[in-house]
Amino acid sequence: MIKKLKIKILLSVLFIFSYSFLLIAQQDTLLNNNLSLHPQEKKGKEKKEREKIDQPVQIAYAGIFASVETSIRFEAKNYILSAKIDLEKNLGLQSSMYLASGSFLYRITPRSGIFASYYGLKRESSIETAKEIVFLDDTIPAGSYISGFFNTYIFSAGYLFSILKDPDAFLAAYINIYFMKIKTGVRSNIIDLDDKVEFVAPLPNFGLLGSFRITPWLTFKGGIGLLFFNTENYSGAIHDMHLVFSFKPTRWLGLDAGYQVFDVRATFPSENIRTHIIYNIKGPSLGVSLNF
């Protein structure tokens, strides 16, 4: 079921981008015509184009009914010893829950703009361990009462460059900076344990956004962001994708339904141990969007 859904999502994205690039060819023809204009005429034409931008501001909020998969693997730097913890199975954290996300888009000119997004997830659970768990340098024996937590806050903001200026087909590339904070750990008063791993990173991210008006009251929107990073302190990858149908009962209000995926895979050192985090959320979303 999940594989079929992923295939459908991929085909939808490919269709969007194929259609978009056909429109890009039309835009290139118009751009070549503009190059022959006098600078004063070109400036006046650009001003008229800015005035024609329909609803340059879009604010969206969505609740994702997310399936969450999180695991941590601790690996000694000699690569001989390692221990893996599944936070949902071993620490009792919720495997499905409500997740808040939001985005902001502002088209300053027909060609440029600002795009920002936010994800927030906070989980904590107290359990009695069913088996022995290794966390960093500590070994938690079976039968211990512990509290595990995994908190994620991700905010990104950056520059947007519009590829298409068609009023019914918007496509843009963006470069954002991710401000990502992942904090996870276990606490226990019984065995004097309070271990945590914290990963804070500003990271550049590249992606595409698209919006296609199907009818006056229905719009299809999508976006995909990809990032692979490898620095002295950490390495990994981030994938972000959303597909949304927006029903507009009024010109300024949209009722949104879609599907979102956010995946983080990060590796970073903590003391004498290398820590690997896999964090994946995916699920249907419902929300609203305001257009001005």
Image: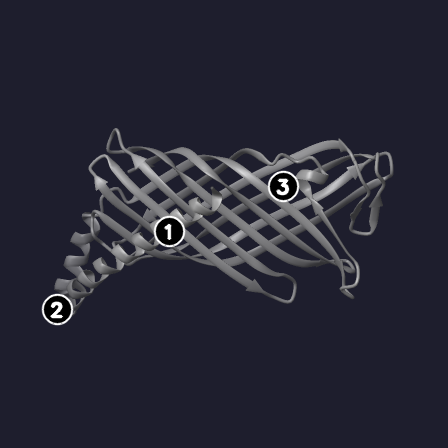
Type of amino acid at the residue the image marks with label 1:
Ile
Considering only vertical position in the picture, is 69 above or below 108?
Answer: above
Mark 2 or 3, closer to the camera? 3
> In x, y percent, where is residue 235?
61, 62
Where's the C terminus, which quadrant? top left
Q: Quadrant of residue 214?
A: top left
User: Which residue is located at x 79 percent, y 59 percent?
Assistant: 81
User: Which residue is located at x 83 percent, y 41 percent?
Assistant: 193
The furthest residue to the top: 249
Q: CA distance from mark 1 to mark 3?
A: 27 Å
- Label whose residue precedes the other's in the sequence (1 or 2): 2
Which label belongs to residue 151?
3
Q: Quadrant of residue 92?
A: top right
Which label belongs to residue 38?
2
Q: Nearer the viewer, residue 223 or 5?
A: 5
The residue at which mark 1 appears reads as 114
Q: Residues within 10 Å of mark 2 (few under 14, many from 20)?
A: few
